[in-house]
Image (spheres, rainbow, N blue to C red):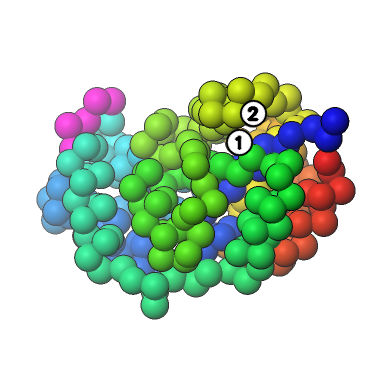
Amino acid sequence: MIPYKLVLFDIDGTLVSLPEKAAEVVQDAMYSVLGSSYTLPYRSFSGRTDWEIFRDTVSHYGENPENHPGWTVFCNVYSDYFMQSVNSNHLVVHPGGLELLETLENDGNFLLGLLTGNIREMATFKLSLAGLADFFEFGAFGDDHWIREQLGPIAKKRAEMISGEIFTGSEIWVVGDSPRDVHTARFIEAKCIGVTNGKHSTGELLQAGADIITGHLLEIAPVMLNSR
Ligand SMILES: [Mg+2]
């Protein structure tokens, strides 16, 4: 029997990118919820969960991020702002993603999931704009845990719940664009394909420990099919 494989996809910088717009919306939501003095402590969100970005911002202004009452409000405001101000014209859908997902789905030996720092609502919205949402039944998201690496076990557990299969590390691939994706893969002893669609170079991803690097999503298909 051909082993069943689990493939977990990051979203931003991997399947799609939102140049500049995402940072703008996060900042606007942060001002609205926390106040106009709460400027984000950094501009690059690469590899971070939405929850980590929120926590880092309140910590930067001397507040305790644990059980911060603004977090739930922020999620709602951020979602509303995002859906009002972002449309498909803001989104870059990286070439080959649709074909890759179709290939893996049609093959029948791959379970596809998400492993993303986006809160669930944003993940679904971004993928809907890109026409990719229907490929994913489950995932682990930036409102499940603030530490990205902790999303790995959550995604794995959900995959096992919906499929009835147990996945060992060698049966799991993580596809992502940042060193944090690689660390998340390692945390569940999975293999990692680094994609250079985001802000990180081949060198950075290799140094983090990625098994394979590619600059085009469609190149992932033969790697996956040969790994069955
Ligand atoms: Mg990413």
Q: Is mark 2 on a helix, strand or loop?
A: helix
Q: Can residue 17 be seen in this view?
A: no
Q: Which residue is depicted at the point 74% across and 34% down?
A: 4
In whole angstroms, how far apart are the C-alphas of marks 2 and 1? 5 Å
Dominant SS in magenta? loop
Q: Number of callouts in the render?
A: 2
In the rendered image, residue 78, in percent from the top left (x then y), is placed at 25, 52
Query: Which is nearer the eye, 161 or 152?
Result: 161
**Could you tell me the amino acid type at mark 2?**
Phe
**Residue at the spot of label 2:** 187
- Residue 97 visible from this viewpoint: yes
- Above/below status of 191 relative to 14: above
Quadrant for the N terminus in the image: top right
Q: Where is residue 55 in the image (x, y as percent from the top left)?
A: 32, 37
Q: Was residue 163 drawn as part of the magenta stretch in this picture?
A: no
Residue at mark 2: C-beta within 8 A of ligand 1: no
| Label 2–label 1 contact, CB within 8 A | yes
Instruction: Indicate the amino acid at tag 1.
Output: Thr
The image shows residue 162 at horizontal and vertical percentages of 54, 29
For the residue with label 1, is its CB less than 8 Å from the closest atom of ligand 1? no
In this figure, which residue is indicated by the disc labeled 1? 184
In the image, the segment drawn in magenta is 66-70
- Compared across the picture, whether 64 is left or right of 190 comes to left
Pick whichever, 166 or 68, lies toward us.
166
Quadrant, the C terminus: top right
SS at badge 1 = helix
Q: Looking at the image, which residue is at 62% across and 50% down?
A: 176
